[in-house]
Amino acid sequence: MTDHVTRSPEGPDPAAFAAFYDRSVAEVFRYFFKAAAGDRRLAEDLTQETFVAAVRSCQSGRVETMTINWLIVVARHKLIDHYRRRSREERKLTLAWTEQSVHDEGSSSAFAVDEAEALTLLECLSPIHRLVLVLRYLDDLPVNEVADSIGRSVSATESILVRARQSLSRRMREVHDA
């Protein structure tokens, strides 16, 4: 029993890849489970992303590099990418209420909000408000592209964004005042 995938003249051996997966999936999942502080869903998602990368590597002919050690290195990169993406999303979400607090009269400062709280606050908004905030601040689309995406004019979309930020800000104040 080897810890890598073999290659036949026709290409990667599917049976060898399946056996490799069976031998290594638990180890990759354990790595992510520990790194994600027990977040099972995140560990499962990242494990899946890692094996998608392995399949792509296999399909491109780079089977000779496919060992469990190599897979853990891929997993580490997936974890780093996840946290970078998460950090970018948190910064972008923070823009939504920071921008609103600048526009609010009498607002002295923006609230500090983590990702979990931001997502909870977004869930409290109407679907259209949530959608425009996600498109504008998470997907980083300019207002005209948000307008195209939702089938509204730019001025109507700007109005929706203002109301969405106001709703988000109001909800934040409710949560922080409670």
Image (tube, rainbow, N blue to C red):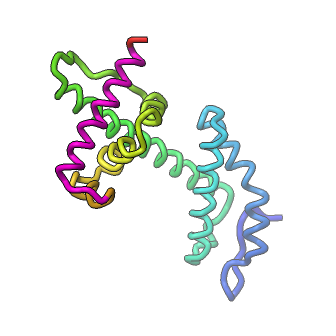
Towards the viewer: 145 or 115: 145
Occupied quadrant, residue 173: top left
What's the residue at 68%, 88% (across, down)? 10
Towards the viewer: 7 or 100: 100
Q: Where is residue 56 shown, x and y percent of the image?
A: 57, 70
Q: Where is residue 112 shown, x and y percent of the image?
A: 35, 22
Q: Is residue 106 left or right of residue 117?
A: left
What's the residue at 71%, 69% (across, down)? 5
The magenta-colored residue range is 151-176
Residue extending farthest right: 1
What's the residue at 63%, 71% (across, down)? 64
**Residue 57 vertical placement versus 12 (above, below):** above
**Residue 178 vertical placement versus 5 (above, below):** above
Towards the viewer: 58 or 83: 83
Occupied quadrant, residue 7: bottom right
In the rendered image, which quarter contains the C terminus? top left
Towards the viewer: 125 or 8: 125
Question: Mostly what secondary structure, the magenta segment?
Answer: helix
Q: Is residue 168 left or right of residue 63?
A: left
**Residue 57 vertical placement versus 51 (above, below):** below
Q: Where is residue 32 shown, x and y percent of the image?
A: 63, 43
Q: Where is residue 127 shown, x and y percent of the image?
A: 42, 44
Q: Is residue 173 magenta?
A: yes
**Residue 108 vertical placement versus 91 (above, below):** above
